[in-house]
Amino acid sequence: MNIMKTLSYRLNTLLALLLTLIVYSDVAAKTFDIQRLENTVSRDTEYQHQSSVLKQARRFMISLPERYYASDRRYPTLYVIDADFQFQHVSSVTKHLARMGKIPPMIVVGIANQGDDDYLFTTTWKVEGDKAFGGAELFQQYLVNELVPLIDTEFKSNNQKALAGYSLGGLFTLYSMMQEHSPFNAYLAMSPSAWFDDYSVSSKIALKLQQNKLTAPVFLSVAREEDMGVDKLATVFESSAKESLQWQFKHYPTENHFTTALPALNDALQFLAPNYATDGTDMVEIGDYNAVIKHFQGLQQQWGGFQFEWLHAYQFAKYLFWSKQVTKVDEILAAIKQHFPESLTIVSIEVAKGLLIKGDNQHAKTILENVKLEGEQSPNWHKQLSLYYKAEGDEKRAQQHFEKALALADKYQLESWEVWELK
């Protein structure tokens, strides 16, 4: 009896194994029809130019904000040291936070180094008896006289320029902060190598603070790194910084020197734009539309300024319907035009979108026509008009505006998520 059970078990096992092999061989023999698409997922670009200051070719990397080609708008710029190691995650986080409405969109400039020796030399000041250090002054000249003017000429940057660095790059960020006539007006130093030169950066910064010569926003961070000297530096800021100075120190006790780069960057960027993200429920709690507009006016005073991005406009339109203020939409849009003229079109489009959903087609059409001059250059303006004409039974005009929306999206190199939302 036991022999029969054993034989039956072995037979079942063998059959299961054979079935598995048959299925696997069938899958292995199958060819999958895949096609590589021409679409560019990442639009970041690396450039090279000849530096007369450094007497060699130098590289830099550029990440442009979404909708960069859709208008003549000029953007804040974030410069990051050690681009070969830092640029990809910095540009990705910056673009993600901007898309989610947490920070203003920025141009990211990655400042590349030429290997470890160059990185060590360009980020440090002179130390007696060691020629491996000492190129910070020359590197600062390169940034001031060559790279920053180049970026301002070739790209749509505005006057807001932040410098970010990590480790030795963070040390150079602090060095640049202490220099007169620096082109930067915000500094993000993540796990800076404050140990360098016998921790002398703390005393150098203490003197600058006492002389009230540091006025730009400063973000400092450190991980589980007891010997970095950043805690001592934070103490200097606590004891010597004026109340008017915007600065922040964050400690990441569960991170090490390498893993802290991403969370520190995320917090550093939002440090420059506190309370920038405001959704519809937040607006309901703030109060009526006058109070909400006043809230957004307050954000204009931040380092990167404020104007309605797509998500702010979308949430604002939802808020108007939730709070039953949509009956005042004409006076509300007049207030937007007064206080945020550059945002009138994007807000009008989102309000019209809501009215179309509610079936108030004629009011939606009127609002769209009121911003026609700028709206004609907006893919989403044409998308809403396409929906309007479709609702009115005019398929020909609906198709014309739909095709125009897609043509503009292609012209402006919109991200794939925006293109698919138009379809």
Image (cartoon, helix red, strand yellow):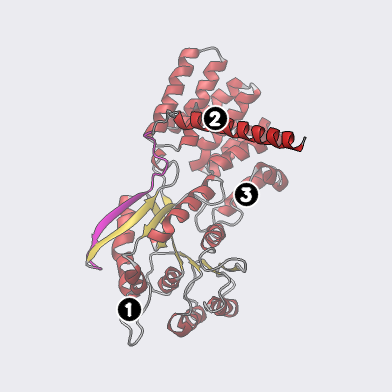
Residue at the image position 52 percent from the left and 48 percent from the top: 96
Find numbered disc 2 in the image and state the secondary structure of the residue it sits on. helix
Q: Main secondary structure of the magenta part?
A: loop
Q: CA distance from mark 3 to mark 2?
A: 65 Å
Find numbered disc 3 in the image and state the secondary structure of the residue it sits on. helix
Amino acid under disc 2 = Val
Mark number displayed over residue 294: 3
- Asked whether, in this view, residue 249 is left or right of residue 31, the answer is right
Residue 79: image x %, image y %?
41, 60
Task: Give the crowd class for mark 2: few <14, some 14-19, many >=20 residues within 10 Å.
Answer: few
Q: Is residue 50 magenta?
A: yes
Find numbered disc 1 in the image and state the secondary structure of the residue it sits on. loop
Residue 127 vs 188, above or below: the answer is below
Q: Can you identify the residue that label 1 sits on?
A: 132
| Magenta-drawn segment | 37-54
Q: Earlier in the sequence, mark 3 or mark 2?
A: 2
User: Relative to the observer, which residue lies in front, 407 or 371?
Assistant: 407
The answer to whether one can see residue 328 in this image is: no
Residue 352: image x %, image y %?
57, 29
Task: Give the crowd class for mark 1: few <14, some 14-19, many >=20 residues within 10 Å.
Answer: some
Q: Can you identify the residue that label 2 sits on?
A: 23
Residue 205: image x %, image y %?
48, 79
Amino acid under disc 3 = Lys
User: Relative to the observer, which residue lies in front, 271 or 46?
Assistant: 46
Residue 70 vs 299, above or below: the answer is above
User: Relative to the observer, which residue lies in front, 129 or 72?
Assistant: 129
User: Relative to the observer, which residue lies in front, 174 or 280?
Assistant: 174
Q: Earlier in the sequence, mark 2 or mark 1?
A: 2
